[in-house]
Image (cartoon, rainbow, N blue to C red):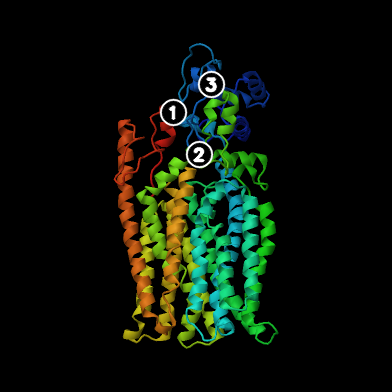
Amino acid sequence: MAGPSRSGFLRPGDASPSFAQTTAEFSLESDLDLDDDDAKSDFSLREAGSDGGEAFEMKRMRQQHQGPVRSQGVQDDEEDEEDSDGWIRPGSASVSASGSGSGPAPERHGSVSSVASFQLYTPDEEQAVVRKFDRRLVLFMALLYMLSFLDRSNIGNARVAGMEEDLQTDPPWQGWYQWALTSFYITYILFEWMSLLWKLIPAHIYVCLVVLSWGVVASLQAIAVSYPMLIALRAILGIGEAAFTGVPFYLSFFYKREELAFRTAIFVSAAPLASSFAASLAWLVVKLGSAGPIAPWRLLFLVEGFPSVLVSLLAWRIVPDAPETASYLTPRERKVARLRLRREKAHGRRSSSSSASSPSSSSSSSSKPTARGSLKAREILQTLRDPLAWLTAGMLFLANMAYASLPVFLPTILSEMGHSRLAAQALSAPPYLVAFASVLATAAFSDRRRSRAYPIALHALASAAGYAVLALAKPLDLPPAVRYAAVYPAAAGFFSVVVLVIAWSVNNQPSDTRQGAGFALLQVVGQCGPLVGTRLYPDRDAPFYAPGMLACACAMLAVAFLALALRVYLGRLNVRLDRAHADGGDTSHHENEGGEEEVGLVKSNPRRRTLAESFRYIL
């Protein structure tokens, strides 16, 4: 096996596990913030083994890089100059020939051949951490969202299974069902501000209580004796599920920007999977429960609601509060999970009071990102003035008109096409399975290409085309098979749009507070879409529901236009940031076209600028 060169640096292509591990162990233990106990650190490095000399050399290089600021006991306000993958940039530090930190010495600047010597963790280690989060965290949160979406959307299957006849008043009123849908979204919107609580309350406690609450309420729908009682239960259900909508914001505590869309897709794609599963389960429950003592629709609410109660108990043990608290990671992996996000979280996770503490203590505390912290009122107000936040919220509003309406009305639409109740339940499943696969493929492509606008626009246009076919079915005299086929691009389109819009919104806010505020605004405005969507298919428009289909087609066309317009807007902002970086200017008080200060992107402090200058909006 090739070893280090005489200079102490590894040659290109060298692989020295012991050295890499020694270097990483030192760097991870100290978090790259050297305290005053240099003798202890030096002794540990010298005792590290045969490759300890290289790690000791790196530590000395770090001391010279920090210069007199550290020796004077002054705490730097920002992280040192590693990039997001934990590399020290070539030329950012020098090494003395003797390994001593005192006195002038010949400088050996970092080079391409030396960069690999100072990697804090290997790509394999990082991928191992990401895979564990994917398997343990993302999939579990997707399961919870699947149960959430199941509990909110199964009312459409319950209506076809006989709920309408049992709960209808005398004299009957056709508006009861629309109000049962609307009541959920009224409270769902009013309590979207609870997305910010993901930053304030330990996640394992928060998730456990939220899932338990909606599971109990969803199960209680089975004992409703009238529409007013069902409406009240649906309103309470909306509160519990609104508290859970901040999951994409929560996932940003664990993943880099270019990793977030696919993980959000795994989470959100549980919705079409839940719709498919709900349709199949509804068919089975209706078939088996038709001869039982309990009405099939009541049994449906009970069977699909109670599992949330059981799963909520698992959340207490499975859901971590932050990357460094995940119980299924080794101590080494917890440090890698934290360090890999040092640059991602440079703005949002630092203590505002760090400069007031001692150098050693504040160095340790400020460099450890956690999911909990304070919210900054100034940044919340800046988000409310941000055109990006409002444009993405408007896109989600339009997409949600279709996203929230089709799952609860599709069984009814299929029944109106001439299918039996059982056939309508069964035929509801395949479009959502196609949507599930489409969402995952689109999100993976979007992350790989670091592109959001074009995939959103393409899927929005496909969805609009599907709705246009459904809207023109009557004048064109289209057969039921063609109308059913048009459901596939419509469903796959709006599910993919919702996923990418959510990821786009979180990606393009530079701090945790702004991410949380932007996500809350996105949900408050976006979830007003279902208030419109749930009223698009009144019984008087059966069996073609042309006005509702046309409204959804226009909404998805508008989404495509807004996505392209937002891409142009963000492209202009990136050009200005590039120009400011090239000129070495300070844009900390620079106003953009929308009147928003570019605060937090490029600071006047030169040490802060090294972290901030790499932020660019994802297009």
Q: How crowded is mark 2: few (under 14 residues within 10 Å), some or many (20 or more)?
A: some
Numbered mark located on residue 607 in the image: 1
Residue corresponding to mark 2: 85
User: What is the spatial separation of the Cα atoms under label 1 and label 2, in whole angstroms?
Assistant: 18 Å
Left-right relation of 134 to 190: right
Q: Which residue is located at x 65 percent, y 51 percent?
A: 205
Foreground mark, 3 or 1?
A: 1
Q: Which residue is located at x 60 percent, y 46 percent?
A: 129
Tags 3 and 1 touching, CB below 8 Å = no
User: What is the spatial separation of the Cα atoms under label 3 and label 1, in whole angstroms?
Assistant: 16 Å
**Nearest to N terminus: mark 3 or mark 1:** 3
Q: Which amino acid does label 3 sit on?
A: Gln
Quarter of the image holding residue 143? bottom right
Numbered mark located on residue 63 in the image: 3
Q: What residue type is labelled 1?
A: Arg
Q: Position of residue 411 (x, y in %)?
A: 51, 79
**Nearest to N terminus: mark 3 or mark 2:** 3
Say what secondary structure mark 3 lies in.
helix
Q: What residue type is labelled 2?
A: Asp
Answer whether residue 34 is visible to the viewer in this image: no
Specify the farthest residue to the top.
Answer: 103
